[in-house]
Image (cartoon, rainbow, N blue to C red):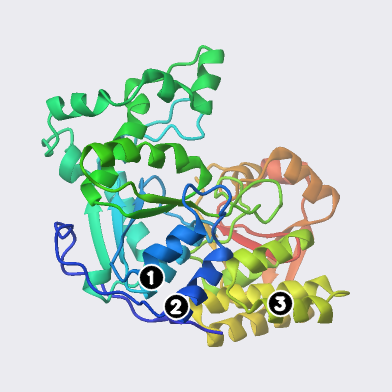
Amino acid sequence: MQNDMTQDKKTPTTASGSADAPRAATERDPAKIEAKLLMLDRLIDWPTSLTSREDLNKALSDGRQMRIKFGVDITARTLHIGHAVNLRAIRHLQDLGHKVVFMLGGFTTLVGDPTGKVVARVAQDRDEVEENKRAFIDQIKSIIRFDIPDRIEIRDNTEWWGTPEKHGRITVGHLFELLRTITVTNLLSRDMFRERMKKLDPIYASEFLYPVLQGYDSVEMQSDLTIVGTDQMFNEKMAWEFQEASGQVKQAVFCTKITPGLDGRDKQSKSLGNYVGLAFSPQEKFNSTMLLLDGLVSQWFEVYTEADPRQISEWKTDFGADPVALKKRLAFCIVELFHGREEAEKAESEFDSRKFKKKVPSVIGAKSVNPEDTVRKALMTALGRKAGDIRDAISNNALNLITKVNDDGSYEEEKLDMVKISAMKAKGALIRWGKNGFYRFE
């Protein structure tokens, strides 16, 4: 089942300025287009999207290369496979010959996106943004092709918005022209702003303008299509008025499916610790997936793998009475998608060896902590566990300290309680959380 997502990628030699370049021909074979649409059916939430499947099919069939906007604010260095859903959807279109235009929000990241925030978000400093850019590009290379120049373009909206030290192309006069098309009533209709007003919390002007900035990015990028989560639909719809005023066709807007995280309580989040990281090793991806709640396995199969639906149905029948075996198939498919079959086989073998022989994994993710942090604090900050989660783990004997690791990987451990974790320093500790969660604090 291994696809070509795993092949070597190269960074393009040109990063911007090609929006007006001649557009390459694209795949027009109806069978190949339909095959990709079937894969998109697993990723795209068609009822929520602002553009229909039928309209996308028409656009793909006319042979004109589309410019696919994927704008990101570089707010964190860690992506997870939930983020990768958008990237995988874009990759399917890229495979048909369309161009991915990555817009790294160097300016809007400094402003701070208010989406989903009922309190003002702290803006990031320049050095942090630049470091996050490098980490982000390194991670997306595992999915998006960077080796075909006419299918990839990287932009930064500091080109037109500028920076605090340098003017961009957009003048104050131009910005005011844009603002003439937007009503305050429309901006205030956003849920997060209404919540702040109810609580008499501040709404900063920079946040208020964020949808305007993101919307206009589509004009500069000459975006034909964008794929986003539901939380960005408002901002991307804002682009339509700007595009029409600029003589451009309104971009198509598609929304991807959002699935619960490993614990089933919310979407994947680093702060909650309920995610499978895109930068995780094959073994870490496999082990993390095995922590998924049984009731979410079917949903994750559909969204996070590309296994044949008929094969998935057979696995459900074969392993119906053995949820662990079915989850192992899921973990295998996820690792295979990002790393290939050989790595998936190694990860499964390592998991089985450790499960039956009680061995620590050969690769354990290191979590950074402060020298004075206790284990309790590290569990909450580095792993994103809540106080209730910790109490539940202790009561279920699911929180343990690895006290010795033998040459063959077998280990000895002692159970932890609230008193111990509140007094013990985290730095250097090797912790087992549940059956498969091993973490080293450094």
Q: Secondary structure at mark 2?
A: helix
Q: Secondary structure at mark 1?
A: helix
Between the residue at mark 2 and the residue at mark 1, the CA separation in whole angstroms equals 7 Å
The image shows residue 144 at horizontal and vertical percentages of 37, 69
Answer yes or no: is residue 254 visible.
Answer: yes
Residue lying at 78% horizontally and 43% vertically, measured from the top left: 391
Q: Earlier in the sequence, mark 1 or mark 3?
A: 1
Q: Secondary structure at mark 3?
A: helix
Q: Amino acid at mark 3?
A: Ile
User: Which of the 4 quarters of the picture holds residue 364?
Assistant: bottom right
Q: Are marks 2 and 1 in contact (CB under 8 Å)?
A: yes
> How busy is the neighbourhood of tag 2: few (under 14 within 10 Å), some, or many (20 plus)?
few
Residue lying at 27% horizontally and 37% vertically, measured from the top left: 242
Q: In the picture provided, is 28 more to the left or to the right than 441?
A: left
Residue lying at 51% horizontally and 71% vertically, measured from the top left: 281
Q: Amino acid at mark 1?
A: Ser
Q: How many marks?
A: 3
Q: In the picture provided, is 263 more to the left or to the right than 91?
A: right
Between the residue at mark 2 and the residue at mark 3, the CA separation in whole angstroms equals 26 Å
User: Which of the 4 quarters of the picture holds residue 333?
Assistant: bottom right
Q: Which residue is mark 3?
A: 312
Q: Which residue is mark 1?
A: 61
The image quadrant where one finds the N terminus is bottom right
Q: Earlier in the sequence, mark 2 or mark 3?
A: 2
User: Which of the 4 quarters of the picture holds residue 211?
Assistant: top left
- Say which of marks 2 and 3 sits in front: 2
Label of residue 30 in the image: 2
Q: In the picture provided, is 385 more to the left or to the right than 240?
A: right
> Does 334 appear above or below 240?
below
- Say which of marks 1 and 3 sits in front: 1
Q: Amino acid at mark 2?
A: Pro
Between the residue at mark 1 and the residue at mark 3, the CA separation in whole angstroms equals 30 Å
